[in-house]
Image (spheres, rainbow, N blue to C red):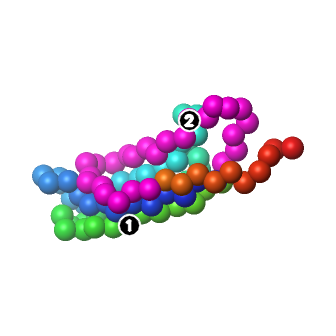
């Protein structure tokens, strides 16, 4: 399981409104349960995005990453925690 959180805001000279999406990727594939989206309407918007998503690792090593889609943005106070919940068998 992965738990992600972070604070996001629009970057300087950006045409508003626009939406950003943050997603969990495991071995290059997007996890459908690990997604958070936010629509920015004002340049002063500052939003927290978070998700918790279970995922399976069938062989090691596994590459786990966070991907963003959408317009330019600033971020801070981000964190990703990965929990091992048990064996497959």
Q: Going 26% across and 60% down the picture, which residue do you hit?
A: 9
Q: Going 43% across and 52% down the picture, which residue do you hit?
A: 22
Q: Is residue 86 left or right of residue 77?
A: right
Please determine whether, in this image, residue 61 is positioned above or below residue 49. above
Q: In the rendered image, which residue does mark 1 sit on?
A: 48
Single out the mark in the foreground, 1 or 2: 2
The residue tagged with tag 1: helix, strand or loop? strand
Rendering quarter of residue 76: bottom left
Name the mark on residue 63.
Answer: 2
Q: Quadrant of the N terminus?
A: bottom right
Q: Is residue 72 left or right of residue 3?
A: left
Between 86 and 4, the one lying in front of the other is 86
The residue tagged with tag 2: helix, strand or loop? loop
Rendering quarter of residue 43: bottom left
Magenta residues span 55-79
Q: CA distance from mark 1 to mark 2?
A: 25 Å
Q: Is residue 74 magenta?
A: yes
Q: Residue furthest right?
A: 89
Q: Please tell me which of labels 1 and 2 falls first in the chain.
A: 1
Q: Is residue 73 magenta?
A: yes
Please determine whether, in this image, residue 45 is positioned above or below residue 4. below
Please say whether residue 33 is visible from this viewpoint: no
Between 19 and 67, the one lying in front of the other is 67
Between 58 and 34, the one lying in front of the other is 58
Verify CB contact (< 8 Å) between mark 1 and mark 2. no
Q: Where does the image place residue 11, in percent across and percent down from the top left?
A: 20, 54
Q: Going 66% across and 48% down the picture, which residue do you hit?
A: 55
């Amino acid at each position: 399981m992965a738990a992600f959180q972070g604070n996001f805001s629009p970057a300087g000279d950006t045409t508003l409104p626009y939406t950003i999406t943050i997603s969990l990727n495991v071995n290059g594939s997007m996890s459908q349960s690990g997604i958070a989206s936010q629509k920015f309407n004002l340049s002063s918007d500052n939003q927290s995005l978070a998700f918790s998503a279970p995922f399976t690792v069938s062989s090691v090593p596994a590459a786990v990453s966070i991907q963003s889609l959408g317009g330019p943005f600033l971020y801070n106070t981000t964190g990703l925690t990965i929990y091992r919940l048990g064996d497959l068998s």
